[in-house]
Amino acid sequence: MNRSKSDRRFANPVHWTLGYLAVWTLLLLEIRTLQSVPDWLHIVMGTISIPLGIFWLRRCDCDRQLIPHQKWIVLTILYILWWQLGMVVLDVVILDTARATAARWGTVGLFGIGLLWVVWGVEQASAHYRQAKLAGDQIPSGSPAPIWNPLNLDASFYAVQWLPPRPGPILTYLRHPQDPNVLPHNQRSRKLDQSFLALISYTFAFLILGLLFSQLGGCREIYELPAGGGEQKQLAQVVKIKKVIRKKYIINPLSSIIFAVPPIDEIQLKLTEITKHAYQVGQGEGQGAGFSGGTFRGKVRFIRLEYSGGDWNQDYGVGGDLNMLLEYGIRTQHKVAERTESRTIGQLNNFPLGKSPPLVYMTGQQNISLSKSEVKTLREYLTEKHGMLFGDNGGSRHFHNQFLAMMNRVLPNIKPVPIPLDDVIHRIPYQIPYLPYVAPHGGKESLGWYKDGRWLAYYHPGDIGDAWSDGHAGVNAEIWEACYRIGTNVTFYAHSEYSRWLDAQKGE
Amino acid sequence: MVGRTKGRMISTVLLFLALAPSVRGQSSHLNEMSLERWGKLREVERHQMQVAEKYFRDRNWTVAADEYEKYMTLYESSNAASHALLKWAMCQVEMRHQNTAIDDGFRSVVDYWPDSEDAIAASFYVGKTLQDIGQTKKAKVALKEVADQHAKHLAGVHAMVSLAQIATIENDEQAIVENLRKLTFQATRDKLTRRQCETASIQLAAHLFGNSQSSDAIEALATTYQLDRLANEVVNQSRTALRTFTSDPKSTAKSAALADELIAYLREQEPESIETEQTKGFAKNLCYLVIDVQQTAKRNDQVLAEFSNIAKRFGSDDELLGRIANWYQANGQYEKARENYKKFADKIVGLTLIADSYRQEKNLTHAIQTYAKLIAADSENQSKWKALSATTYREFEKYAEAITLYQQLMQEDTTNGDRWLWETATTHREAGDWRAAIGFFRQSERFPDSYREMASCHRHLKQHSEAVTLYNQIAGGDKAAAPWAMLQIGYTEEEAKRKDQAIAAFKKVCKLFPKDQNASRAHAHLQNQYKLTVTLGGSKQD
């Protein structure tokens, strides 16, 4: 059999496994940055790891001499591969809460596995140096040079008494100066110092790598509006009236035949309200419903803002956000994303000027704790990047106060005002004759922060997100329909204002 | 320093803004028709206008708007048509249709009746409404026009106040001062505008003191106060600035300069002779004001010298002794303070102050001894001094002694029996003696407070069923407290680990009182604790 050199190389499973891992790593980087490769390819690539993993595990059992500790290496790599596969699958099936949990606990697991490897590595290295030292003892030497290698337990910086000794042992020593067991010359353990250093160094390195990895995708993130055009007008409503006339029976009351007397004729009026798009809802000139400042790849997305201190993820993943996004798509015919998303306030920095989200949604019922840099980021997002914040009180007066306090820090020179019911945000595309709410946690008026001819923030005091969720929190149809309408109006307002701003930028 | 001055400025102006009347308050004078105008209306016109005004007063905005609209349709050429349109627009504002109010109401009044009184008011309302809906840029233009063109009119004064409000929010110090100056020196002060102009002058003075412009500040205050009160107000309004300067080591020179200027001003005011009681009182007051300035500037040695000066000029009395004692006490010299209190002509007051000083010094024994002296000296007010003794015991957590005194009071002062009963109960509660507290609360007639307290004590004793029974009684007996009581039932059931009953109670609050704050809490609690979303019915804006 004369096989070529390359054939022989690929016949070796180590080679094609390394090749697979290289491709997988590239795809991992891609999903963190470009996100242009379809999800199914990620799943396919991840799924390949299952037979591959089984193969390697069986091989480890059969051939124990291949690489030392090969089974543990295989298991570690498989942990990473399968964890990421699970994440992609959860992402595709839109189980956001489960994905967030998997991400959190997966990271903890990865940290633990890495720590075990570090402990093992340090132990191996120190054993190695111990043996080398024992071998070196037989050779006479001059004055020893200081050792700086942290893997060597004899390193100069281990067991240094940085702090003065405790008074207890000193007093014992003074009482019993002849006792060799009191006040040992070296109170600290070198081994303990080495383990402590290893733990600190590993934790620091893990955090730095994690931070870098989480920021990897940041600088390339973009948000594009759906292309198109349309008018900023109220949706026309057509009411069709259908008369249903029941048949009328004429019965002789004196007849000898016994009838079950049917009801007297009834005229039932069925009023069917149909909302018809008499025109395209949108902004600017363009084909199809959308925005003149948009692109053909662009979609309306629903982004929830993550913040610390409270429960940004209140009812996240129970359908409220997604329902609203889908309703928006149905009502306006704009292209919408397949799923909702969440971003931290810091991640808003990752969106460039002109490609940032026109609207972010924020809810909760507990504390809102923003750092100075987050306040600055949010201010820049609202004022310079032309963004808009949609705040929703998820369930307490406390959140109301927290939200107002936060906005006072973000926009100190703007006072919140009740938004008029005849403002454009309450008129287009739907006329909102009254403010609906699920529960008046923060009052009964929507508040707004207005600057330079537009609303920078819209705050709904009455848990509108609950009305959007599956089951609509039990409120009646009239209320949840009005809540969807408000959601549609605010989303449309933010996008059309953003599109108009983009047009103005182009003009300039 | 500048930042601090600016901060102080803004905080004081915010206070001024809080005092400023609301739109509705302003409107009550700006949008009222004069009797003369009423007199010019025909009978039918007057009737229709009265109908509309009645609904307006009753805050039935929808009907009022319809009635004003009816007036405009029927009597378009009437003298009061502009007024009807103005009021119609105000109804729109109340119904939160502010854009409609501006475009179809206020601006139409200005366009169609430019020479009427209503046009001036409407011009102001355009700016004010724009301000209220956050459109501050447009609001400033509109309000400035009114302030400039009608500075002597009530609308002009309101416009200046609104401009100051906007400047405060925008942190524009120059604009704030400019508007305060206009309000202080230019605006006409009548019974409608006086309060705003006076407040503006006070805020302006405080700001000018902060900028070391004391003569201008005094001039601003002089527009508001007569000579007899001016000196007091000068010292009051300069205190914050002087304190700020004194507390900052970098501004010691400013502090000294301001203090000297103030003292020089006060000395200038002294009357030439102090023969009459009035002039003597005025001169003495000025001396006390000088001490006030010295104290704020932390010139302690000069304070004592000033006190002895007063004693020499006007003789010693309880007021002077009290001030000296207060000064010692403020400096932590309690013993010297008490020496002065002992010299009081009014021994009862002196002893009371001594007891207070012992309490401040955390000296229980002497405080009680002093109260004992008071009981002996002032037999008419024995119950008052005993109650104060009991309060002192409670301050020092000597609950048993306090309770003994309250029980004595219950027997001696039967007219206030319920009060002493309540005090006994609360003392038992503070001592953590829940059972005894329940016993005394039960005897009290203060429903529902007594039931509330009893339920709380039962909860501390883990007697949850008893607490629930009491809360149910509150819910049944007091409508206002019912939502709170039912919410507490939920919490109590939760403490008793009866999860189902707790959920049922929380749901009941949501169902029965959907618009109450307690329902909101129950709703949030169900969501957080049990992941249950319960409807509060959902509703429309009222």
Image (tube, helix red, strand yellow):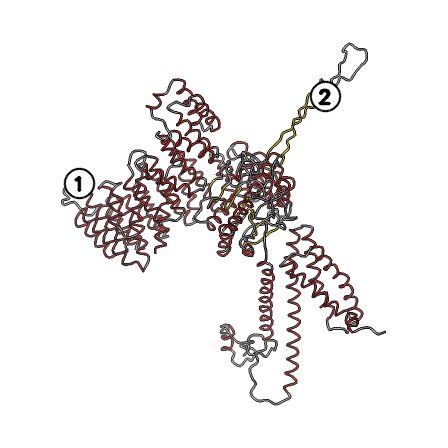
Left or right of residue A42, residue A417 in this image: left
Mark 2: which secondary structure?
loop
Left or right of residue A463, residue B409 in this image: left
Q: Amino acid at mark 2?
A: Arg
Residue A76 in view, yes or no: no
Q: Amino acid at mark 1?
A: Glu
The location of residue B465, given as percent across then percent down, is: 59, 39
Left or right of residue B122, residue A424 in this image: right
Front in this rendered view, residue A156 or B381? A156
Mark 1: which secondary structure?
helix
Left or right of residue A170, residue A272 in this image: right
Residue lying at 64% horizontally and 77% vertically, measured from the top left: A126
The location of residue A360, given as percent across then percent down, is: 56, 48
Q: Which residue is mark 2?
A: A246
Front in this rendered view, residue A195 or A274? A274
Residue A174's disc number? none
Q: Is A312 rendered above or below residue B37?
A: below
- The image quarter in which residue B244 lies: bottom left
User: Which chain letter matches label 2?
Assistant: A
Q: Which residue is mark 1?
A: B277
